[in-house]
Amino acid sequence: MGMTQDERWLAKYNEVVEFIESNHRNPSRHRIEEHDMLNWVKANRKALNAGKLKEERVEKFGILLELTELYKRKNQYE
């Protein structure tokens, strides 16, 4: 039997959080192997902004967004 949608969402959420914490950076659009995570984050951010993200996911995703803010790309010339 497959995972429920919620279980899949949580698994991807944990994967992204783990990735950011271990690599100290966000998933890159320049690395094919990170596209899944990047697209997942973008899709969920879009759903959040449209008010379509499931309520039980909003809080968790908010925590993830705070984490992504910490590792936003820095301007190398600053």
Image (cartoon, rainbow, N blue to C red):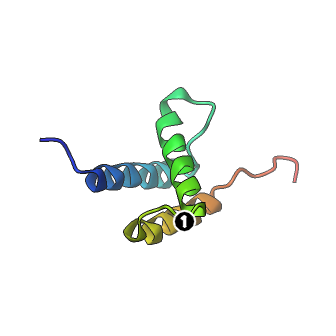
Q: Is residue 75 left or right of residue 59?
A: right
| Residue 19 pos. (x, y %) | 46, 48
The answer to whether residue 28 is above or below residue 62 is above
Split into 4 quadrants, where in the image is the C terminus?
bottom right
Q: Nearer the viewer, residue 75 or 7?
A: 7
Q: Nearer the viewer, residue 58 or 54?
A: 54
Picture quarter with the N terminus: top left
**Residue at the location (38% across, 48% down)?**
12
Q: Which residue is mark 1?
A: 51
Q: Secondary structure at mark 1?
A: loop
What number of labels is visible?
Answer: 1
**Which residue lies most toward the left here?**
1
Where is residue 54? Give x, y as percent.
Answer: 41, 64
Q: Residues within 10 Å of mark 1 (few under 14, many from 20)?
A: few
Q: Residue at x 81, y 50 (%)?
A: 75
Q: Position of residue 67 (x, y in %)?
A: 55, 62
Q: Left or right: 27 with respect to 58?
A: right
Residue extending farthest right: 77
Res 65 → quadrant = bottom right
Q: Is residue 39 above or below residue 50?
A: above
User: Residue 26, image x and y in percent?
Assistant: 58, 48
Residue at left offset 50%, top offset 61%: 52
Amino acid type for the residue under numbered disc 1 = Gly
| Viewer-closest of 46 and 75 | 46
Q: Residue at x 55, y 43 (%)?
A: 27
Q: Nearer the viewer, residue 34 or 57?
A: 57
Q: Quadrant of residue 38?
A: top right
